[in-house]
Image (cartoon, rainbow, N blue to C red):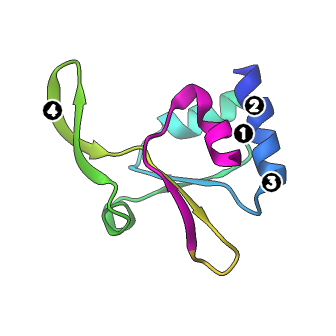
Amino acid sequence: MIIYSYLLNKLCNFTKKLMNISLPGDKQNKFAEKFGFKYNLLADDSKEIIKAFGVWGMKKFRGKEYEGVLRTTFLINEQGVIDRVIDKVKTKEHSDQILE
């Protein structure tokens, strides 16, 4: 996690704002607190934002299909326009994917 923290700090220097939008739950907050992450965690109770961005859909895990949030990153510029979408998020390489 030290590497992730380092890369997250690098991203915070690179970006104006970093935030995570997900379904309600304590997992994200506990994770962020544990590792000292300094980004906004927003809970989308109604799934309104998640669905508007098209990131709610069918997922597979261990051969089972279910609906859930599709891990996706949107890079939004200062004018509020989406510059880039990363829909093939690779957890271990994600910071580098963003900085490309």
Q: Earlier in the sequence, mark 4 or mark 3?
A: 3
Q: Residue at x 53, y 30 (%)?
A: 91
Q: Amino acid at mark 3?
A: Phe
| Residue to which mark 1 is pinned | 37
Q: Which residues are magenta?
A: 82-100
Q: Amino acid at mark 1?
A: Phe
- At mark 3, the secondary structure is helix
Can you give x and y, in whole percent of width and height, for residue 89 in the image? 48, 39
Q: Earlier in the sequence, mark 3 or mark 1?
A: 3
Q: Nearer the viewer, residue 100 or 98?
A: 100
| Residue to which mark 3 is pinned | 14
| Residue to which mark 2 is pinned | 5
Classify residue 63 as left or right of residue 87. Answer: left
Can you give x and y, in whole percent of width and height, for residue 13 in the image? 84, 51
- At mark 4, the secondary structure is strand
User: Are circles 1 and 2 on residues that touch, CB within 8 Å?
Assistant: yes
Q: Earlier in the sequence, mark 4 or mark 2?
A: 2
Q: Is residue 47 above or below residue 37?
A: below
Q: Is residue 31 above or below residue 77?
A: above
Query: How dense is the environment of label 4, judged by Cα within 10 Å: few (below 14), some, or many (20 and up)?
Result: few
Q: Residue at x 74, y 39 (%)?
A: 8
Q: CA distance from mark 4 to mark 2?
A: 32 Å
Q: CA distance from mark 3 to mark 1?
A: 15 Å
- At mark 2, the secondary structure is helix
